[in-house]
Amino acid sequence: MKINICLSVITSAIFLLLVGFMPIDNKKTNLGAVDPYIGGMGYLLHPTRPNVQLPNQMIRMHPLRTDYLDDQISFFPLTMISHRRGELFGILPGTGNPESGTWKERQTYDHDLEITRPFYFSTYLIDEEIKAEFTPANRSGFFRFSFPEKMEKRVRMHINQAGHWNIISKNAVSGEEQFFGMKAFVYGEFNQEFQSQVKDETKIIKKTNMPRVEPAAWFKFSKDQGQVVGFKYGISFISVEQAKANLKKEIPDWNFEMVKNSGEQVWTKTLDQIQVKGGTEAQRRSFYTSLYRTYERMVNINEYGSYYSSFDHQVHKTDRDFYVDDWVWDTYLANHPLRMILQPQKESDMLNSYTTIYEQGGWMPQFPVLYMDDPCMNGVHSTIVFLDAWRKGIRGYNTDKAYEGIRKNGTDATLLPWRNGPKCSLDTFYREKGYFPALMPGETETVKEVHDFEKRQSVAVTLGASYDDWALSEMAKELDHKEDYQYFHQQSTNYRNLFRPEKKLMWPKNAKGEWIEIDPKFDGGPGGRDYYDENNGYTYQWQVQEDIHGLIKLMGGREKFSANLDQLFREDLGRTKYQFWAKFADATGMVGQFSMGNEPSFHIPWLYNYSGEPWKTQKRVRFLLDVWFQDNIFGIPGDEDGGGMTAFVVFSSMGFYPVTPGLPLYNIGSPVFAETKIKLTNGKTFTITAHNYAKANKYIQSAKLNGQQLNRPWFTHSDLLGGATIELEMGPLPNKKWGSTVEAAPPSGIE
């Protein structure tokens, strides 16, 4: 009888534990379709991270581990510095002595006992038998640790960089962490009184094998205070007092479920803005997970009327949201355009933030992360974002000041990759000769400003600058700056200077104007950076979004253009995969020489719409979605870049895409859903319906726009804002006549 009673108690305890790990969403809802683990194992580069946060808000938490295959957690960060740029503060529960115990370094967990939702996280630390939970607010967070009975309850908190901890009371603590020239502050409270110890700990960093001192605070809780230790905290970049105020405003009591439920409601409303019907469960999971990821960045760091800016190192008072953390080389292509549809006011606030950063720091930023403008990659593509927003009716910022900033970048800033500041001799050469000069193989670099690793990227810089100059010229025209328009319009055609007709590729020239003989598949050092950037010449063959019809003409007409596109997807690597990826690690998701895993490729499969073969766009895009964006841990082919890549999935799955940001129009592809509805903030609804929908019926037979025949593979932003309905009649075989005429092709930026 005793045995049966014991078994019953044990069974009940196991059941209660497992109930705590059961899914908390109905999988039929849009929010329930989100799986943050998709892409959690990178093919070669960074995996996605299962971030728990509210849309575009400061607090972003994911357990610190290598990737999904790693079964140990180092700690739980209180927030992130920036996308993939490190963590601020850390917390980890345990039961052992601070000088020993299984939890001193890393904690083992079980994947199957872990739940991650956009608004809630829980995991089970097996060695310590502790359930850890987290839910976020905007500028604060809430952890809950359920300890085993009759065991010591301890929590360790540490600082990743320089900083210190202060014990405020018997249940409150504050901390300060210094990073990259600025500070973060935390104020936190436990739901139980503690005994504390603050000390420095030395850890060996595996990547560098170098020691690092981490200021740590240890907290011990009495066994008779209950098994659940709660910790709620506020983060600030202004002061500890502001961190405390943020916490008191957002999480005034100890109701964990209320904070979690509030986050669930926010995400439900956000994801319900797009409703889809049809498609497979896997396609819905990939779609809504991608949509969730597009809300990781930018993040609002206004702390209820004030924010700290690293661009002038001042605290500013304003009621308007202030956003940072944008990698515009990645996000101008699809993430910003998607936000212009879904959240135009938020996009306006972000562009206002860009303009404010220019006023504070003297340059229109390239990668405005939390702690500085970090000039990664090449090009100043915020110019394109401003033009795109302007033409889509998104204003609400100081237009004259914004134009002043983007013009200064066009006239005074260097074009060198990964460099900020004034122009150098290579920039003067570019403006005079119309291309960025490359070095001959083996030639020693003589310009000291050139980055040691990133090199000149001569072709990529020329093509990127041409697009930026086109956007600047068009913005000048919009604002009636006639001389600027004429000058930058002429500069926008510089890409033509590097087109080599017999090769049908964009090719590097030296300072004498001579072609440099290279293998465009493989030469140029790591990532092809002497001439290109992260991708080879076959990707940069198509980097002329602003003048696609001009590129068609350079290639000898529509038929040859389409033939070149076909060959791109069929051209072999010319060597083993091992050799190729040892040099081009970013060029993942390869189909022939097409790289799905890197942003410069996004628009390429849509280019058939311009050459009279829209059916090939329908075929290619559907194939790429099916192959490279599946609903599993390998479901992202390259660096996802915090919404930069998944915005492509959202657009392409809906069946349209903004090939040329700066032109307010969208190319039509092949939707993966029978119906997509977008609830617009103006109260209207945009609808795409695929009649005769089936997975095999991916080809458009005919189309209607608001009931009228649509014989072209594109529509305008005005159509979308007006709440248009697009009806596509689908079939299993291509209709090669639909959208095939010259008149049906989408407009190009330079006509």
Image (cartoon, helix red, strand yellow):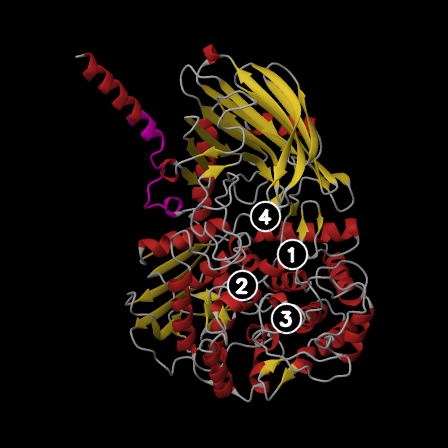
Residue 29 seen: yes
Classify residue 235 as left or right of residue 656. Answer: right
Circle 4 packing at 10 Å, graded few (<14), some (14-19), many (20+), is few
| Residue that badge 2 annotates | 598
- Which badge, 2 or 4, comes first in the chain's sequence? 4
Measured as percent of width and height from the top left, residue 557 is found at 53, 88
- Report the amino acid beneath label 4: Arg
- Which badge, 2 or 3, comes first in the chain's sequence? 3
Circle 1 packing at 10 Å, graded few (<14), some (14-19), many (20+), is some
The reply to whether discs 4 and 1 touch (Cβ–Cβ < 8 Å) is no
- Report the amino acid beneath label 1: Arg
The residue at 32%/58% (across/down) is 279
| Residue that badge 3 annotates | 532
Circle 3 packing at 10 Å, graded few (<14), some (14-19), many (20+), is many
Residue depth check, mark 4 versus mark 1: number of the one nearer the observer: 4
Q: Quadrant of residue 694?
A: bottom left
The residue at 41%/26% (across/down) is 129
| Residue that badge 1 annotates | 395
- The residue most toward the front is 209
The span from disc 1 to disc 2 (Cα, nearest Å) is 30 Å
Q: Between 401 and 655, which is closer to the camera in this rendering?
A: 655
| Residue that badge 4 annotates | 84
The span from disc 2 to disc 4 (Cα, nearest Å) is 17 Å
